[in-house]
Amino acid sequence: MMTQLSFAQSTSCYQCTSNEKPDCESSDVAKLAPFKKNCPPLTDGQYKGKPSIGCRKILQSIEGENSVVRECAYAGNKVDGLKKTGNWAVHLHYYQCENTKPSEPCNGASSIFVAPVLIFTSLIMTIFWQ
C-alpha cells in the first residue's frame, strides 16, 4: 500500500516595517534579504488555517511620518498603488502581488514614482489643512 504525501509550497514574502528596520524601505534585494520569510498559515481570525495568497507592500504616511510595511497577504486581490485615506493625517498606498515563484518575494520592488508621489501628496495635504 502506498501513501501519497503532498507538501504545500509556502509563499515567501519580505516581512518588515521601516519604523523598526530602516532597510525595509530599500528596493535593494541584498538589503531586503534578512526580511525574507515563509508565510505561515494564519492561527486565528476569519482566515484561520489559510495559506497566504501573495505578498503586500504598504507605503504609509501618518501625520507626515512616512514608512513602509511589507507583509504576507491572506485576502484581497492584486493591486498596484490603491490609495486609502483615513483621517486627514493618514494616507496609505497598497500594493499586493502574487509570487510567480513561491521562493521569490514579489513585494520587494518599488515604483520609481511612488516615493516622490507619496511625499508630494503628504506635503500638499499638510499645506492645505493647516
Image: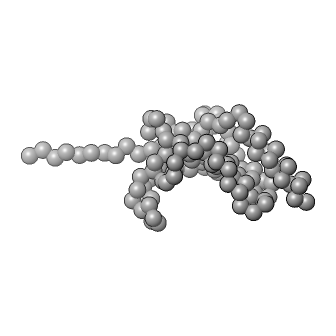
* Residue 39 drawn above or below residue 102: below
Left or right: where does residue 113 sit relative to residue 9? right
Left or right: where does residue 53 sit relative to residue 79? left
* Residue 103 drawn above or below residue 15: above
Applied colour scheme: one colour
Percent across and percent down for residue 2 are 12, 44
Q: Can residue 65 be seen in the rendering of this structure?
A: yes
Q: Nearer the viewer, residue 91 or 31?
A: 91
Q: Residue at x 8, y 46 (%)?
A: 1
Q: Nearer the viewer, residue 109 or 38?
A: 109
Left or right: where does residue 49 sit relative to residue 58? left
Q: Residue at x 54, y 38 (%)?
A: 106
Q: Nearer the viewer, residue 82 or 52?
A: 82
Q: Nearer the viewer, residue 20 or 127?
A: 127
| Displayed quadrant of residue 24 | top right
Q: Residue at x 81, y 54 (%)?
A: 64
Left or right: where does residue 32 sit relative to residue 62? left
Q: Residue furthest left?
A: 1
Q: Quadrant of the C terminus?
A: bottom right
Q: Residue at x 52, y 39 (%)?
A: 105
Q: Residue furthest bottom?
A: 45
Percent across and percent down for residue 36 are 53, 42
Q: Can residue 34 be seen in the rendering of this structure?
A: no
Percent across and percent down for residue 26 are 67, 39
Q: How many marks?
A: 0
* Residue 15 drawn above or below residue 102: below
Percent across and percent down for residue 35 are 57, 44
